[in-house]
Amino acid sequence: MRSEDVLARAEAALQRHGGQSRLQQRAIRRLVNSGKIKAKRVLWLSLAFLIGVPAFAMLISPIGIMGFLLSVMLFFGLALAAVILPAGLRVDPERLPTAPLKSLPLTTEVWLAGQRRALPPPAQRLADSIGVKLEQLTPQLQALDEKEPAALEIRRLIADELPELVNGYLRVPDHLRRDGLNGMSPDKQLVEGLNVVESELQRMSEQIASGDLQRIATQSRYLELKYQGME
């Protein structure tokens, strides 16, 4: 398949699923939630300082000017730590293979969103579409047994092969990513690989849904035969 065809499919996938806006909205929501958590940390720390220092000075021992200055320095140090320490979900790609299957799509989506800015624009659009498919896949995996072949296939794709593809691209020096060596463009190879991942996620989702529908149809037929026989 020509790289032009791959890029065209990437654009079509983006238009079908509206991946970019949804994935970015979810990333912004996570950032806002992280900011809220850090703001709460500083608020509780401020309350503890405003109540704790006067209470200590009145009930236990006067602290004096030097003690007050030391407590202020301690407060600012703790406040800085509360802001710097991460409050959101941070994903180490090495831990993806051992993540629980139920949370693996969300974990992979968070990791992929963190790599998005380092990818070329066509790959960013495919990453957005993959993120939406991971979101759609999450409820389908809640009842899927970890040992089922479908679960193993999904884990291999999004916990091993996808991170290996993206990390392999990021290890290539910037000046070699577009043209590469010997006519091999890492940019094009990345887009082609992400396109395969996007297609495979779609196929797997449909496969799982088809299995669910088959089980529902089987259960419905069983109940129908059971109660008709009783009548």
Image: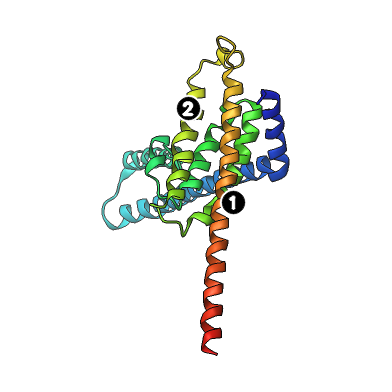
- Counting from the top left corner in percent of width and height, residue 17 is at 68, 45
How far separated are the C-alphas under marks 1 and 2?
28 Å
Locate the C terminus and report the quarter of the image it occupies.
bottom right
Instruction: Judge depth for marks 1 and 2 and give the one in front.
Output: 1
- Counting from the top left corner in percent of width and height, residue 47 is at 44, 53
Q: Say what secondary structure mark 2 lies in.
A: helix
Q: Relative to 175, is 21 above or below? A: below
Q: Quadrant of residue 195?
A: top right
Contact between marks 1 and 2 (CB within 8 A): the answer is no
Q: Relative to 40, is 71 above or below? A: above
Give the residue displayed 56% in from the left and 9% down from the top.
Answer: 182
Say whether residue 88 is visible.
Answer: no
Q: What residue would you read off at disc 1?
A: 206
Give the residue displayed 52% in from the left and 71% down from the top.
Answer: 219
The three-letter code of the residue at mark 2 reads Asn
Bin the neighbour count of mark 2 within 10 Å (Cα to Cα): few under 14, some 14-19, many 20 and up. Answer: few
Q: Is residue 123 left or right of residue 148?
A: right
Give the residue displayed 32% in from the left and 42% down from the top.
Answer: 67
Q: Say what secondary structure mark 1 lies in.
A: helix
Q: Residue 17 versus residue 110: which sits nearer the camera?
A: 17
- Counting from the top left corner in percent of width and height, residue 214 is at 55, 62
Considering every residue shown, the one lying at the far top of the view is 182
Q: What residue would you read off at disc 2?
A: 167
The three-letter code of the residue at mark 1 reads Glu
Q: Quadrant of residue 15?
A: top right
Q: Residue 102 versus residue 211: which sits nearer the camera?
A: 211
Considering every residue shown, the one lying at the far bottom of the view is 231
